[in-house]
Image: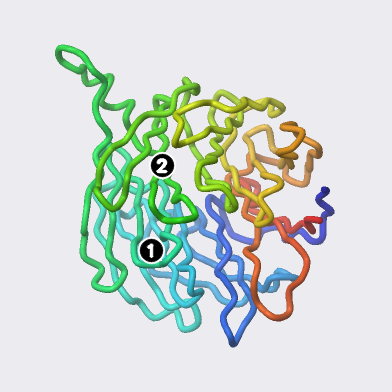
Amino acid sequence: MKLAGLKSVENAHDESVWAATWVPATTTRPALLLTGSLDETVKLWKPDELNLERTNTGHCLGVVAVAAHPSGVIAASASLDSFVRVFDVDTNASIATLEAPPSEVWQMRFDPKGTTLAVAGGGSASVKLWDTATWKLIASLSIPRPEGPKPSDKNSSKKFVLSVAWSPDGKRLACGSMDGTISVFDVARAKFLHHLEGHFMPVRSLVYSPIDPRVLFSGSDDAHVHMYDAEGKSLVTAMSGHASWVLSVDASPDGAAIATGSSDRTVRLWDLNMRAAVQTMSNHADQVWGVAFRPPGGTVVRAGRLASVSDDKSISLYDYS
């Protein structure tokens, strides 16, 4: 397996690019790359040339997270302005505006069926679940406080939720916290199941294997990438290679590899059979906030693609084969 650089767009945004995801293809258009930036905009890019399709405004502070609905029809952007904006991908028409108190949204993901949007709730130490039919809040999954006579304020701030991921069957939701713990929930029962231990610094990114609902990957400020059996509560392997914080992790659609982006300015490709990094890409001149594999599907597209976004304001696109 390997990555080959296809294209980079310098100054894709006016400021740091903090978030990226792929909007799945629809019957009328290919998949699009969706990026969010400190410059307050969200941009949509054509998949192979990275030509700018459209710039969406509507936030008055930096965009920290973006998410795409599995249908490819709607997407969401979250900003430091305390709002999540849900919009029609092809027209940019606003569909809903969800209020979230300042700095309460750090990541969000639609579930595989598209019925629920999960929002990682920062200092509220919870994950909020929004119904995508009504855009009403349907549940708030609270992360249990550490055991003890009286948790100090210091402990509570460490339960700050940074990341969230759905299992491919939609039954489990994992979230990563500032203190390095990962919490796993049974979504149907809105019930906390267990913590996954092993990281001792913030867990900024999580992704489940697309082919095994038990396997969860995490990236942390401790510079390690962990592979967990999320049901058996066990750490399967800890992989090292980055020289600094791991800011983003994504799994390839074939389930054979993961990619990571780091504050060491590199993107790495990891072979899951070897459980090791097999390639390092150094396209970016500053920390890499997001990596995203293009989902399979669409008529035109055969080859695998990976995109990365960075504080250097650029986007890079790679072939994955």
| Label 1 SS | loop
From the viewer's perspective, is the residue at label 2 or at label 1 nearer?
Answer: 2
Q: Is 266 rendered above or below residue 307?
A: above
Q: Position of residue 291 (x, y in %)?
A: 63, 50
Label 2 Cα crowd, 10 Å radius (few <14 / some 14-19 / many 20+): many
Q: Nearer the viewer, residue 313 or 29?
A: 29
Disc number placed over residue 18 in the picture, else none: none
CA distance for labels 2 and 1: 28 Å
**Based on the displayed image, in which of its 4 quarters is residue 78 positioned?**
bottom left
Residue positioned most to the top? 149
**Based on the displayed image, in which of its 4 quarters is residue 319 positioned?**
bottom right
Mark 2 or mark 1: whose residue is earlier in sequence = 1
Would residue 274 appear left or right of 136 to someone viewing this image? right
Q: Position of residue 285 (x, y in %)?
A: 72, 42
Disc number placed over residue 59 in the picture, else none: 1
Residue 205 seen in the current view: yes
Q: Residue at x 21, y 65 (%)?
A: 136
Q: Residue at x 77, y 33 (%)?
A: 274
Q: Position of residue 294 (x, y in %)?
A: 65, 62
Residue 104 seen in the current view: no
Residue topped by disc 2: 174
| Label 2 SS | strand
Q: Residue at x 58, y 30 (%)?
A: 226
